[in-house]
Image (tube, rainbow, N blue to C red):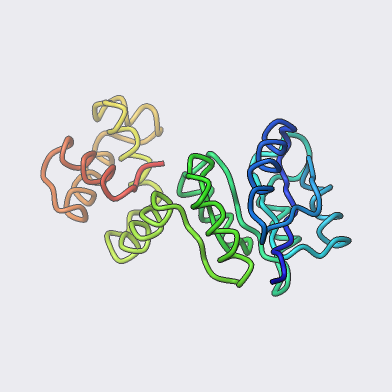
Amino acid sequence: MTAVRILLCDDHAVVRAGLLALIGSEADIEVVGEAGSGEEAVAMAAKLKPDVVLMDLQLGAGIDGVEATRRIASPDVHVLVLTTYDTDADITRAIEAGATGYLLKAERPEELFAAIRAAAQGRTALSAPVASRVMDRMRGAAGPSLTDRERDILAQLAHGLGNREIARALFISEATVKTHLGRIYAKLGVDTRAGAVAVAKERRLLP
């Protein structure tokens, strides 16, 4: 059986050492290189041609994990993100950059091993919380479409600001705030400020 060849990319040497020791327990997975930066990962991936690059997103100075993923991902080299960050923005950017999978560092070792094997075959591997966020985002795409201004006002509502305070913060009139609030309520199917904030949080419409 041919082992899955892995390149580790994390800017923390202790994390890399931990992953190296962990992955070393699996006979069918072999670590062929370690990178401490995005630039180093790109160069090593081109030289070593690993099956999977285990990529952190935050890499200190230089290019981040998303940009490194964009430069590395190909039909022959799959990138599996392994990070502590699970925001919608991080997940979306990584997947759009070509990541085959997105795993959280809190996962159990067996989940990591399964994800590595899946990524090596070009199959998508997502942590359960990440898969849930992706599904929520897809469902939300079919939901209400708020304008940028409506989102701005919704964000101010979430901070507990009144109409006058929102108007001052956004440099618009109170009447304009009220007009936008009416549209927001209609789109979200609510009739109170608290209801609007609650639905917005549920549907992840707030930044």
Residue 202 versus residue 17: which sits nearer the camera? 17
Residue 197 versus residue 77: which sits nearer the camera? 77
Task: State which quadrant residue 206 falls in.
Answer: top left
Q: Residue furthest left?
A: 191
Q: Quadrant of the C terminus?
A: top left
Residue 203, given in percent of the width and then of the height, sits at 29, 50
Give the vertical position of 145 relative to 58 (above or below): below
Residue 197, given in percent of the width and then of the height, sits at 24, 39
Give the vertical position of 3 relative to 184 (above or below): below
Residue 194, given in percent of the width and then of the height, sits at 17, 35
Query: What residue is at 29 percent from the left and 32 percent from the top?
Result: 158
Q: Residue furthest right?
A: 47
Query: What residue is at 67 percent from the left and 65 percent from the top?
Result: 78
Residue 173, given in percent of the width and then of the height, sits at 31, 35
Q: Residue furthest bottom?
A: 75
Query: Horizontal placement of 177 versus 170: left or right?
Result: left
Residue 13 versus residue 92: which sits nearer the camera? 13
Query: What residue is at 64 percent from the left and 48 percent from the top?
Result: 25
Query: Horizontal placement of 152 versus 198: left or right?
Result: right
Query: What residue is at 27 percent from the left and 62 percent from the top?
Result: 143
Instruction: Give the tally of numbered discs.
Output: 0
Q: Quadrant of the N terminus?
A: bottom right
Task: State which quadrant residue 137 falls in.
Answer: bottom left
Query: Horizontal placement of 42 versus 159: left or right?
Result: right
Residue 107 versus residue 188: which sits nearer the camera? 107
